[in-house]
Amino acid sequence: MAQNPELNDWDIVAHGDRCLVVRFGTGIDIMIGRRCAAAATALRKAAIRGVSDIVPTFNTVAVHYLPGHFAVNTSVRHLEAEIERVLRHADLNGGSTGGRLVELPVCYGGEFGPDLAEVAQRTGLDEEGVIRLHGREPAYVFMLGFAPGAPFMGVHDERFALPRRATPRTSIPAGSVAIANRQTVVYPNDLPGGWHVIGRTPMVLFDPQREPATLIAPGDSVQFRPITAQAFKDWPRS
Amino acid sequence: MSITVIRPGLSSTFQDSGRHGHQHLGVPVGGAMDQRAHQLANLIAGNEHDLATLEITLIGPTLRFDAPACISLAGADLSPTVNDMPAPLGRPLILLAGDTLSFGERRSGVRCYLACHGGIALPAVLGSQSTYLRGALGGFQGRALRKGDTLPLNTRLRTDSLDALAAELNSMSIYLPSTLANNPRPRLRVMRGPHTELFTDDALRALFSSAYRIANESDRMGYRLQGPSLPVHENRQLLSEGASFGSIQVPSDGLPIVLMADRQSIGGYPKIGHVASVDLPQLAQQMPGEEVQFEEIGLAQAQQLDNLREQALSRLSASLDGLRRRIAQCVAHGGSP
């Protein structure tokens, strides 16, 4: 494994009086992302009293906590020490993110992927080439956010280093698969957005009545699988 | 055994302490904007646990009780009345079948919390009864109340002894610890954060010396502030990371936004600081057009104040044990309504 000194350490900073953020390295990097997911898994397993949420992102893990669980004067120091202890004992490099490989069917282009032609033109590929490159290897799920169940995935080939659209769309249909900045997002419901929409999945990404509520979790990997418009139409709706 | 919504009010939604534990799935915490008032309402209605209260915004609803109930109101003074007679805030009230609770002009605050003893029968969605309007989930059918809605009460009171109960509750003293009293401060207290150094000295001076006006576009997700712009040293794209209630994020236009209850779980804008949790109830009771000012506070002190308030709530809860037992004597058991 490449020895990146940033990978072997972290620091902990306070975001206000109810949240500590553990920072691992800088930039969007799958190695750092995996460490965040592994750290989040270890912290979740440790079930530290007073901790309400553990939120991995690209290069941080936010640990949200509630007041009243620690002695009045020691809460932040106590929690910081607990986090340090858990992380020192966890195998953050072993890739134990608890992640699964999830296959995501996508119908590319046409009415479902209005930006596919433009992406092809800008990357110098044809539409088939864009689809092949997008599904060449599984994409790593760094985090969920901006809407319940919405994954940020990457890191794609440099040819997908496209900035977001100058003018965001006011509404992008649920299930839309969109790329920008070497990443993919999927819109779980109809939302505004500025990413390049290249396809759509018939899968439901978020259903609060389902257990688990989200199709994809941080630390998972997602393999995009092209399907036809007919297969999309015939896909069983759960 | 229910409440009928005669008029829904401006935006009346059920909220509890929040949908904790699902932010890593992108699910916002939500919950009551003014947690202090929400918890007070619950405790004074004799609820020991965190049940959803009705968060009533600015223009209150008209609610007809079709069964007797013990309720309490806390937070904004929106001139509540029961059968057109003024009703006090911060007191347990016995309503009889047919009574109507309504609201009038705003005297102070924005958000009033209505707690019913035993709570309203609402399904928990991801462990919480809070309404998340943008995601249309939780609360009463994932939305604000509408005319004609029927809200089922969980608890039925025996009708034979309500006069005695009302009289006793009326004479019962409730001592509010001073840390729970609503004493607005001239300035909201703000902690520095890890992004504070990204901002110029001028930006920090402006934050702590200027008055900011709460913009009309403010809502449960965030309070947008208008005032001096808060520039950063250089415009750098930050990676998204966890966001908190009270974080003051500054988009590229330099105008701060205080993240509130329905904030997203992650955000990518630099945060110049974080409003102390203990001062968030005060901010949640301020409305667009009003001004806020900030002063600095250290993390340790902010945290101590947060913990002291939490302890005061526990003490208040313990002191209301008699009230809870007295109400429990009048709760009907068994049989269907």
Image (spheres, helix red, strand yellow):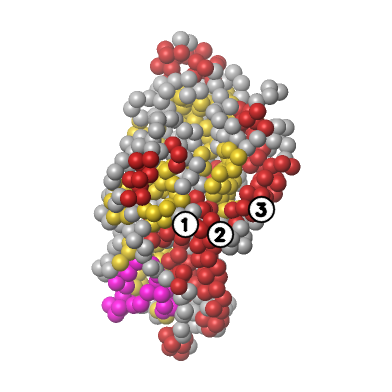
Dot 1 falls on a residue whose secondary structure is helix
Crowdedness near tag 3: few (<14), some (14–19) or many (≥20) residues, C-alpha within 10 Å: some
Q: Can residue A111 be seen?
A: no
Residue beneath disc 2: A67
> What is the C-alpha distance between the residues marked 3 and 1?
21 Å
Residue B332: mark in rendering:
none
- Where residue A212 sits: x, y (%)? 60, 44
How dense is the environment of label 1, judged by Cα within 10 Å: few (below 14), some, or many (20 and up)? many
Amino acid type assigned to the residue bearing label 2 in the image: Pro
Query: Would you place residue A207 above or below residue B293 in this image?
Result: above
- The residue singled out by tag 1 in the image is B277
Q: Residue at x 69, y 49 (%)?
A: A46
Q: Chain of mark 2?
A: A
Q: Looking at this view, is B98 or A80 the one in front?
A: A80
- Mark 2 falls on what kind of element? loop
Kind of residue at badge 1: Ser
Q: Are labels 3 and 2 on one chain?
A: yes
Rendered position, B111 above or below B319: above
Decide if residue A35 is on the left or right side of residue A228: right
Identify the residue under disc 3. A48
Quadrant of the rendered structure where residue B279 is?
Answer: bottom left
Kindly identify the residue that appears in the image at 42 percent across and 27 percent down.
A195
Question: Numbered disc 1: what chain?
Answer: B
Tell me where residue B94 appears, x and y as whole percent. Answer: 42, 80
**Toward the viewer: B291 or B11?**
B291
Residue at image x 66%, y 49%? A81
Q: Which residues are magenta?
A: B66-93
A59 in relation to B148, above or below: above
